[in-house]
Image (cartoon, rainbow, N blue to C red):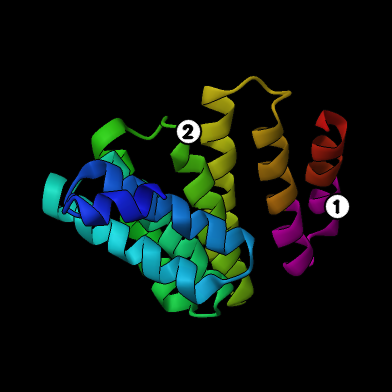
Amino acid sequence: KCFDIMKTKNLTNHPYFAITLGNLGLVHNLKGEYELALDHSLNAAEIIISIMGEKSLELAEAYLNIGRLYSILGDKDQALEFLENSLQMVISLQGEEHPLVPILYQDIASIYESKKDFEKAYELSKKAISVNSKIYDSENNFVAAAYNSLGRVLIHKNQLKEAREYLTKAENII
């Protein structure tokens, strides 16, 4: 309803319209309608750029959602482009200890893992753990998720002893 009202009132270049489009994208994502979700998310990003410019936390969040959608749709290169842009934007605006940074490291690591670039996935997973450890206590679920991701990468690298250590750390937190 909000979407329709804003269109009727010609408020399509308003920040709330971008937020509404982004939210619609999330709804379509949850419903498994990934192409429609991507369309709404890309439109939201365009509006954010037109209002706030090429660099804002809002755009970084939109790019995170777009990157995840491209990943779901199997376009790993596009996913990496949006996620890496989001990461650089967040770091430049908020510093490396912003909560989105380790999430982005993990999302990017996951894509490299799927591309079988386990060294890059390992490096990014370690960064996620490092940042999570700085901003959360050691018993936080985000820390556990990072340990789990690193453990999975280590399995692929056939470093089973080290993988078990990280997976056990994750299990002990959860």
The image quadrant that residue 29 belongs to is bottom right
Q: Residue at x 46, y 59 (%)?
A: 25
Q: Position of residue 148 (x, y in %)?
A: 75, 48
> Is 143 displayed left or right of 33 in the figure?
right
- Name the residue tied to disc 1: 161
Q: In the rendered structure, which amino acid carries the disc numbered 2?
A: Pro
Residue 135's mark? none
Which of 165 and 64 lies nearest the eye of the viewer?
A: 64
Q: Which callout, 1 or 2, points to the residue nearer the camera?
A: 2
Q: In the rendered structure, which amino acid carries the disc numbered 1?
A: Lys
The image quadrant that residue 107 belongs to is bottom right
> Is 135 displayed left or right of 62 in the figure?
right
Q: Position of residue 89 (x, y in %)?
A: 27, 47
Q: Which residues are magenta?
A: 151-164
| Label 1 vs 2, first from the N-terminus | 2
Q: Does residue 44 lie above or below 15 as drawn? A: below
Q: Residues within 10 Å of mark 2 (few under 14, many from 20)?
A: some
- Name the residue tied to disc 2: 99
Tell me if I can see residue 53 in this picture: no
Q: Does residue 146 lie above or below 68 as drawn? A: above
Q: Position of residue 67 (x, y in %)?
A: 44, 64
As measured in the structure, the alpha-carbon distance from the residue carrying label 1 to the one carrying label 2 is: 29 Å
Which of 64 and 119 lies nearest the eye of the viewer?
A: 64
Whether residue 18 appears in magenta in the rendering, the answer is: no
> Is 65 displayed left or right of 6 in the figure?
right
Q: Main secondary structure of the magenta part?
A: helix
> Is 47 displayed left or right of 170 in the figure?
left
The image quadrant that residue 118 belongs to is bottom right
